[in-house]
Amino acid sequence: MRFMIGEQDHGKLLRSYLREQGVSSALSARLKRTEDGMMLNGIRVTVRAVLTAGDVLDLAIEERESPPHVVPRDIPVEALLETEDLLVVNKPADMPTHPSHGHFEDTLANGLAYRYAVNGVSFRPHFINRLDRNTTGTVLVARHALAASFLSDRMARGEIKKTYLALVRGRVDAPFIIESGIRRRAESIIFREVCPVGEGDYAKTEVEPLVWGEDFSLVRLIPYTGRTHQLRVHMASVGHSLLGDDLYGVVAGDMKRHALHAASLTFPAPRTEKMTTVRAPLPADMMEQMSKLGREAVMLAKKECGQTGQKL
């Protein structure tokens, strides 16, 4: 990736400039070990180099080979936004984000690897957020190490906002906030449970009702932390488990998976830091279920999710 050094950066140490561009210490170390990792005006330099206005800096951050454990597979994926730095996709239900035990060739990572492989492009997926296998919606993927460093840092700072829509059991007609610890239940590698703040990992979720009935409600969920199963665990802990949740609730009725959709992501774009919002259309099964709450529920859901995206 090429950077043109302007007057505002004249006289800076390369180390300081890289830090301002979002280059993490780990990435900086990798660039130092790479033969052509940091080239200033065509000459290999170290982070102690002094920049001059008009200099041309080249950083070898592009992926040069795809990871061997991510096998390309022709799996349809919906792109909501694609730039040279990142990709936002709309993950469907019944699709893990990345390979794991029992799912080595049917994941979002496999589909993305195929998409780039057929175009002769090396691709190493840097997932900035991850969704459970049966959660649908927006997934942010960095396309190279610098974007991954920048976005991961912004995620850690709380500058990336995630908004979910969920269908939950019972009547939720007033907003509230859930704060707790979340920990793994003893003797289980999957199941999580709430615990007092100060124990486990701190977790905070904002709950905003949109439309409610006696049997179930449509709510907006905003997580301030990113714990495993956080939204599912938090809603179950207050007696409003997600419809179709086979782990923390009950599978009954038309929902055959937990009714949770990552409706939107708002994040600063790498290099420009311009705030960008991407929305993912609601899946058919949730739309069908929420229609039972009336036309208002469907209208609000469509407004939350937008109607953009194209097939890769």
Image (cartoon, helix red, strand yellow):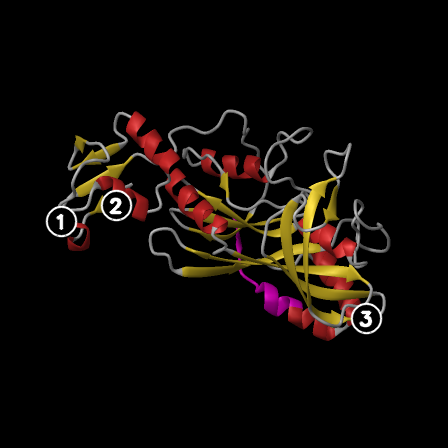
**SS category of the residue bearing label 2:** helix
In whole angstroms, how far apart are the C-alphas of marks 3 and 1?
63 Å
What range is drawn magenta here? Answer: 301-312
Residue 290 place in picture, x, y as percent? 75, 65
In whole angstroms, how far apart are the C-alphas of marks 1 and 2?
13 Å
Amino acid found under the numbered disc labelled 2: Tyr
Q: Quadrant of residue 70?
A: top right
Q: Earlier in the sequence, mark 3 or mark 2?
A: 2
Asked if 131 appears above or below 68 in the picture, the reply is below
Q: Are marks 3 and 1 in contact (CB under 8 Å)?
A: no
Q: Residues within 10 Å of mark 2 (few under 14, many from 20)?
A: some
Which residue in the structure is indicated by mark 3? 213
The image quadrant where one finds the N terminus is top left
Along the horizontal axis of the image, is 23 left or right of 161? Answer: left
Res 272 label = none
Q: Name the one closer to the observer, 197 or 264.
A: 197
